[in-house]
Image (cartoon, rainbow, N blue to C red):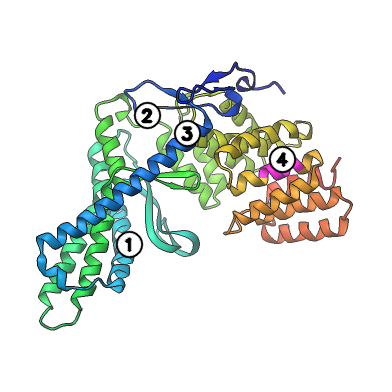
Amino acid sequence: MAQTTHEAEAPSVCDKCGLHVPRQDLLVRQRRSFATKSRWFCPTCVAVRSQRRETINWVLMLLGVVALIVGGIWIAPELRQYGFSLAGYLAGTVIGIIIHEGAHALVAWAVGHRVWRIELGVGKRWGGFAIGEVHVHLRRLPTMGFVISSPTQPRFSATRTAAVLIAGPLSNVLLAIAAISLGAAFRGLELIPSQVVYGFVMANLIMFAMNIWPREIQGGPLALKTDGAQLLGLARDLGKTHREQLPWMVPSIEIAERIARDEDELALAAYEAAPLDGTEHTTMRINAMVVYTRLGQFSGAHAIGVELLEDDTIGPIARALVLNNTAWAGLLDGQKDRAEVFARYMDFALETLPTNAALLGTRAACAIAMGDIEHGRELLEQSQTHDPDGGFREIYLAWLAAADMRQGHAEQAAENIAAARALAASSREVDAIVKHYITAPG
């Protein structure tokens, strides 16, 4: 197979540190805004800039919270006599998150958007339910959440989008006002201690401040923008050409949500029905790679990846995911002779996402395919360490079986394959691993 163009390009220079870095080493271009010229940054500078930006955001947020508390006491001196109730604060946080995300979803539905998913909390998922076609996921720590929705109108509406974004923070302010009013109304009855009301109110005001402050929240490979950041971007982009609803935007969200629900056939149908014209976002094509892979169409997924690797304008995280999906699809397609090339892809990708379970698993697969069994086993264990939900358990067991077979442990390999099939009886990925690396390991 022909090498992708990014492997053969001449070195480039990082605009920050002046380091000469080949394009194949993930030199990335980031647009700071639509109005400014793009600049090039090496992976190290990107990581430093992201960490510095996150640190500054947290310092400013903490200063804002302190100012909020001090300002509240200055405006209402009687608050000094109230102790801070941790119970009230925790109750305000949990209830505030539920109301906040519920307000986003309700307003999105009211303005005609399709609501796909509501996430309440972060960390390991421990439950969930569905309200019609809306999936609600409950996670371990109730510290934040988000709503996935997509517009259904053919033309982008800034007013509708702004209403959806404002609904969440506004609900926290209204909840704080309601708590103050109820606390004042029932103060004489002493049903609710003033300390509890104070903690509840402060939790919602802090939640309002944290959401309205324009910043990004890093969550592994994801960077979630706060409501304030999205509103700022919305105001900045008004009047520009992308006010027209891009043809890939709605199907891109649908594809991602179908994948999350394991509705692979529907995801593929959404991708094939999308009016693709070359302007579609990288995320949509990455998701298409996932769909093709899960449906066993590994050569199709690999072909999309090869095309995407020729695009030197995608950001570092997207490029890491493209490298991973390209290598993964190639391995499952039986391209054993390119395992060393895929391993190099993964080394580049892991510079950006060094603790990503999927990337570590793919790098382990490359090592096993090249015959470096012990290194492959070590990487598999690292992958499991960073996969607390066990989402890749059957893949881990399948590659463990491949390593066993390479070392002549046929019985152990059979046990691991049986365990993998017990977890995912119809996994085409497990089938491909068995076909190319266990029954024909050479």
For the residue marked with disc 1, what is the amino acid?
Answer: Ile
Three-letter code, disc 2 = Arg
Q: Nearer the viewer, residue 241 or 109?
A: 241
What secondary structure is marked by label 2? loop
**Mark 1, other Cα within 10 Å: few <14 / some 14–19 / many ≥20:** some
Could you say which disc has been placed on residue 46 in the image?
A: 3
User: What is the span of residues highlighted in magenta in the rendered image?
Assistant: 362-367
Labelled disc at residue 98 = 1
The answer for how far apart the CA atoms under marks 4 and 1 are is 42 Å
- Quarter that holds the C terminus: top right
**Which label belongs to residue 32?**
2
Q: Nearer the viewer, residue 37 or 272?
A: 37
> First in sequence: mark 3 or mark 1?
3
Calculate the distance from the C-alpha at mark 2 to the C-alpha at mark 1: 33 Å
Q: CA distance from mark 4 to mark 3?
A: 32 Å
The answer to whether mark 4 and mark 1 are in CB contact below 8 A is no
Question: Percent position (x, y) of residue 37?
Answer: 37, 20
Q: Name the outermost residue toward the right.
A: 408
Give the distance between the C-alpha atoms of the residues marked 3 and 1, in whole angstroms.
34 Å
Query: Between tags 4 and 2, which lies in front?
Result: 2
Q: Earlier in the sequence, mark 4 or mark 1?
A: 1
Would residue 280 be counted in the magenta stretch?
no
Q: Which residue position holds label 4?
A: 332
Q: Residue 151 vs residue 174: left or right?
A: right
Q: Nearer the viewer, mark 3 or mark 2?
A: 3
